[in-house]
């Protein structure tokens, strides 16, 4: 009798449906908007035309720079793993270099300090690939820049107008918290030439490489 009961219970247990498998996690689309705060690090050009205008050697011009960038983007078209974005950015950067004196004599003095100042504003279009928790992007914009290279002891007047600037590149955002992400960006800025003016040195057309890192908030 006991054996019969055990066999009956075993048969009933075997007849039950197995537990359903958990539903797969579906990636969520990219959030509808994001704000960026980034530290850009431009590489300025050591151009002979600029050096001649300032009366210094080409290698006396600064190369490394640092600045601050703020941006915002909205995504009017969002799919599961793609979003089209519209936004804009404002950037300010600067760099400086002082020519070190040759030798170690007490009478030796450092050479002039050359400074570079750059401001840029631009609308942006972007193609974004990924999900809500992290995505990469390609971006492009056409905006305006003001670039000034000057001697610290002989500052130049600010430009009365801006020059056309094309920027293009890409980056990525990784959300480490619900509303906070770490972002990286690599961009080229192609700045049109600016003719010499009263109190200002001419700048030829140049392309700056800018790497940036910062945070994003959605």
Image (cartoon, rainbow, N blue to C red):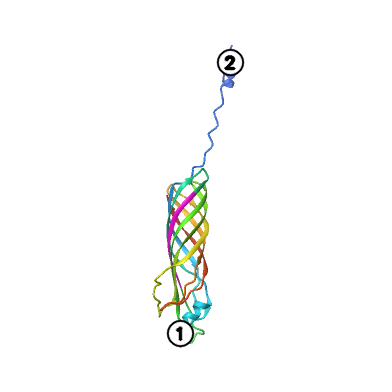
Q: Which secondary structure, mark 1?
A: loop
Answer with the quarter of the image where residue 14 lies.
top right
Please tell me the numbered disc located at residue 8: 2
In percent of width and height, residue 66 lies at 45, 67
Name the residue at 50% across, 85% down.
104
Task: Specify whether residue 105 is painted magenta.
Answer: no
Residue 109 is labelled as 1
Q: Which segment is the magenta one?
A: 84-95
| Label 2 neighbour load within 10 Å: few <14, some 14-19, many 20+ | few
The single residue placed furthest to the top in the displayed view is: 1
Q: CA distance from mark 2 to mark 1?
A: 101 Å
In the depicted structure, whether residue 135 falls above or below residue 61: above
Does residue 91 belong to the magenta stretch?
yes
Number of residues whose C-alpha sits closer than 10 Å to that of mark 1, classed few (under 14), some (14–19) or many (20 or more): few
| Residue 194, x across and y down, in percent | 47, 72
| Residue 67 drawn at (x, y percent) | 44, 65
Question: Secondary structure under badge 2?
Answer: helix
């Amino acid at each position: 009798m006991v054996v019969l009961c055990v066999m009956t219970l075993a048969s009933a247990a075997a007849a039950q449906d197995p537990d359903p498998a958990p539903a797969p996690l579906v990636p969520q689309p990219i959030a509808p908007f994001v704000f960026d705060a980034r530290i850009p690090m431009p590489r300025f050009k050591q151009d002979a035309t600029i050096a001649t205008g300032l009366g210094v050697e080409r290698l006396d011009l600064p190369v490394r720079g640092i600045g601050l960038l703020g941006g915002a983007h909205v995504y009017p078209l969002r799919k599961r793993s793609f979003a089209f974005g519209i936004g804009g950015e404002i950037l300010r950067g600067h760099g400086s270099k002082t020519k070190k004196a040759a030798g170690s004599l007490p009478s030796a003095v450092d050479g002039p300090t050359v400074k570079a100042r750059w401001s840029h504003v631009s609308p942006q279009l972007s193609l974004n690939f990924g999900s809500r928790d992290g995505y990469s992007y390609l971006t492009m914009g056409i905006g305006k820049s003001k670039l000034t290279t000057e001697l610290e002891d002989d500052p130049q007047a600010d430009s009365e107008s801006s020059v056309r600037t094309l920027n293009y590149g890409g980056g990525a955002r990784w959300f480490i918290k619900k509303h906070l992400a770490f972002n990286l960006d690599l961009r080229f800025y192609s700045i049109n030439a600016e003719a010499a003016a009263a109190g200002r040195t001419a700048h030829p057309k140049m392309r700056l490489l800018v790497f940036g890192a910062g945070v994003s908030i959605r």
